[in-house]
Image (cartoon, rainbow, N blue to C red):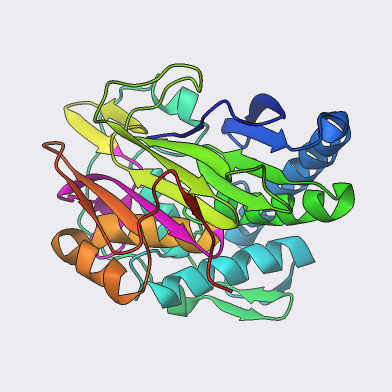
Amino acid sequence: MTTSLAPRVTAATEWRALGTTVRLLVTDPALLDPCNLLLARHLAEVDAACSRFRPDSELTALDGTSGRPVRVSPLLAEALAVALKAARDTDGAVDPTVGTAMRALGYDRDFTLVREDDRPVLLTLRRTPGWRTVRLDGDTVTLPEGVRLDLGATAKAWAADKAADTLAQAAGCGVLVSLGGDTAVAGEPPAGGWQIRVQDITGPVDETPTPGTYDTVGLTSGGLATSGTTARRWRRGSQDLHHIVDPRTGLPVRSPWRTVSVAAATCAEANAASTAALVKGAGADHWLTRQGLPARLVRHDGEIVTTPGWPGPASWRAAA
């Protein structure tokens, strides 16, 4: 379920941060290294603010506030604002208050460690507290007792948007930032646009997947994201689990779609919509159409459904 990049760019580098693969592409090879240094600094700041796996992160510190208003950094305030907007725009299908549910499923550490733990878990049907219980007033956050936040559905995509915009302005060249397939572009794109391979199965960029399991999209602005239930899966006891939680139940979502890819004005919007589509289930393609969002939805049997405007290799630009 990774968005991979076809080899049509002038310079690229790849490494890991935020528990996922980071890929940076620029149209000026001479600027790759300085851009990568800025990106590494940005992602370190995002991790310190937004990680729910670090005991010293700002987000983790909110767990013990017991309903008291707490001032947070501008970075975390912005990340929370993006998460709450995603919840509002998706009618609560994407909800940052799923933190307790994620912990109950065993997803309480880096995913590489989650897969190594096979101890049984007790699955309990329980609606999440709901995003409306979170109060954000400028840089002050108030969480009710017992509410834990998880920004996994929005933070990486938002970080990709912020990084791409920052690097493009600083370097004056075209930039693409991909964080685990959440892809944002900014600046002047290469001729023909950034050619991005959307695929259902995670794999290296230089390995083309089996025909029919991927699509190529030309992107000149905005963002592209893929969400799915096939990549981040683990087993606890007799339970097969994945990381997309339905806020209505607190359990891994049961969806007719195995992956959903969306193009939008920002990567954050694209990722919120692709995740929401999995939660909304059978009517998701119609919901995406009403939202005016180009999308590619793949059923478990491999059938592909697209919404109007889904871009092909020809360049696609987000509406102004």
In this view, 155 is above or below 117: below
**Percent x, y of residue 293:** 38, 66
Task: Give the residue displayed 44% in from the left and 57% down from the top.
Answer: 263
Residue 242 falls in image quadrant:
top left
Q: In the visual, does 114 lie left or right of 59?
A: left
Q: Position of residue 1 (x, y in %)?
A: 37, 35
Q: Is residue 69 left or right of residue 146?
A: right
Residue at 26%, 36% (x, y): give it: 241
List x then y, in percent, for residue 53.
58, 40
Which residue appears at 83% of the width and 38% of the height? 35
Span shown in magenta: 242-266
Q: Position of residue 283 (x, y in %)?
A: 16, 66
Q: Nearer the viewer, residue 57 or 265?
A: 265
* Residue 144 visible (yes or no): no
Q: Quadrant of residue 95?
A: bottom left
Q: Residue at x 47, y 69 (%)?
A: 86
Q: Nearer the viewer, residue 101 or 227?
A: 227
Q: Residue furthest left?
A: 301
Q: Nearer the viewer, residue 206 or 66?
A: 206
Residue 309: in magenta span: no
Q: Is residue 259 magenta?
A: yes
